[in-house]
Image (tube, rainbow, N blue to C red):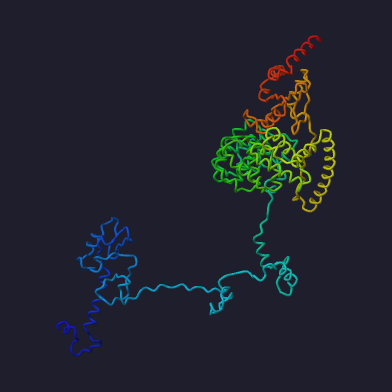
Amino acid sequence: MSLLILLRSAPGQANPRPTSVRGFAGRVNKKYQRVKKLAPRYIKPEVCRQDGDFPVMPTKGLSLGSSIRDLDEAARSEGYQGEDTVPALQDRQLKPHYYRPKAVESRGKSPLVHAKEAKGTVAPRIPKLRKLPNPFEPLHRNPKGWGSDYYAKYFKDRERGLDGNKELVNKIISEHADKLGRPSENGEDSDDVERKKLKRKKAVRARDYWYEKNYQSSDPLAVPFMCTKELKRNMLNEAHKMNQNPDLAVDGALWEAYLRRAAQLSDKCHFRSLLRVFQAAASVQVYNRRVVPYYRTILAACAVKFTEMKPENFCHLMQALSRLQYRDEKLIAMLQKTALTWPTVPHKILVKAANSAAKLDLATQLWCKPLAIALCQAVCENTLIVKEFMNIKWITAVEMFDDATMINYLYRAEAVKREQLSDLRYSRHLQVVELYVRLCKEEAVWQQLNDNVKEFLRDLRKDDESVEEERERLKEEKRLAREKRRKEVNKYRKRLKKYGEEARPLAVKKTKTERLPMSCPFHREVSELLSAAGLQLMNGLKAGPFNLDMFHGPTNTVIEVCPEWQFYANTTHLTSRSRVRHMLIRKMGFNLALVPFQTWESLSTADDRLSWLSRHLPRHLRLPELIQERDTRREAAC
């Protein structure tokens, strides 16, 4: 009562608001709640389970420092007054779904209560997302009647009524462009025309980008100061110049300087620049032995950057190396990394990669088997187009095809000849394959073929012309080439009048030359030396698909010279094509004798070379007796 008396207003003063016990207790409770919010709450460590509940740590009223303190000690040091501060949470576990209600009717409850236990509280309102109606539903399901116009405000779609009639609509618009009041170009809307002009890019041909019209060969002394881009462009222009003028001799010093500079920049440039270097060198076919270390350095840089390459890039690399006839053990590691990609590459790339691997004598390697399996599968499933099928070389078929694939290959060749092509442009590959099948696979493959395929292969041999027929054909081809050249010159003059200096230049066409009995100067030297010794030889004799270098009829002996291009670069290993050629010549029944160029170049005088030939050629040639008879005749003449 004393408290109520003190709270009453003084005499003579108006009491604007009556005071009650309930109102006073409410104000005190609100003040207590404000103070309680600022005070830290003490939570026993055993209440919060770190494995099952998220860690709860009160942050209000705590000063977070650099050091980590225990929760119990922190709460007590910041004003903890006893264990009954939060009595409702003594035996309660904190869960993520506890929340603080806006108003609590029961004052004895803890401020943190569960939703099911908080009677009379206001739960937080969760906004619900309104479901967009489907404009294509029936009206009884869509009472508001929202149609395509409603969705047109949110989604941009094409005029579906014009599907399939775009050309007709554009034609009508172009005819009535004046009435419609908007310009038209080729029956297209002006917006479409402007959009295409923005997207359109000027296409530059590769020859216009790389090749310069007035190119002059670089000075070898200036090559060491070239950057990667300048070096790549100069190498491609030099290779293009050599291809356009076959009579020009290869400048060995210039190409050696190019490759030396490329080796110096190999670890600093992109792998595509290295591929361009190999492409240019392979186009000219630089066989100089001094450049082999540079090839090794550039290929090592390509192996380091192999993870950036695609299978197409690796195929182009093998193509260039096969033309250069350079083998390296790094190619096997590259084949291992691309073993799983061959079934996914285009067939054009697959055939090129297989041809290059066969030329590099990699077909017998273990990691080349996936490539061979992918090619055999494409041939057996008949998924190659005619151009890709005809690009398969004979060395690829001999080295990579198994018996079943060889049978399918010959059947497909006969079908191409019968149904799609009236004449095969180059039948030598099939002739070598037939010779290999008849000599080495008679029971497994040849006897499994039907009469149509055998007749087709026999016709290919009959169509093969003799030397006299070839000369007549070459004369006719020269006459046709002159007429074609005259037409091309007239077209070039018209282009020159129309475009001026930007006109495409007149290409230099390579004409076929008559087949000579001597394959190379090395062949000529050996033949002249043996003929001078009294050995009667026939040069350039045709035997099946091969032209034999020298043939001695009485003893059925074939003497083959092995020039530099029949060996891999800087090695004494014969190429795969030379090895299979020699094997087939022996299978045909000839006695084969080889004369390698390494031994020939090591002998300086003609007498030394002749004495070496007398020791290493077969004895039934009687070359020593012929040499002795020649010397006797010379002494008698003196």
Tell me if residue 545 comes above or below residue 196 in the rendering: above
Residue 492 x/y as whole percent: 80, 48
Q: Nearer the viewer, residue 163 or 503?
A: 163
Q: Nearer the viewer, residue 381 or 77?
A: 381
Q: Is residue 244 left or right of residue 133?
A: right
Tell me if residue 115 comes above or below residue 599 in the rendering: below
Q: Quadrant of residue 99?
A: bottom left
Residue 396 x/y as whole percent: 66, 39
Identify the residue shown where x is 71% and y is 74%.
180
Q: Quadrant of residue 245?
A: top right
Tell me if residue 306 comes above or below residue 565 in the rendering: below
Q: Quadrant of residue 88?
A: bottom left
Q: Residue furthest bottom?
A: 12
Can you say which quadrant of the picture contains the C terminus?
top right
Residue 328 x/y as whole percent: 58, 35
Identify the residue shown where x is 19% and y is 83%.
7
Residue 352 x/y as whole percent: 65, 43
Can you say which quadrant of the picture contains the N terminus?
bottom left
Does residue 336 appear in this view? yes
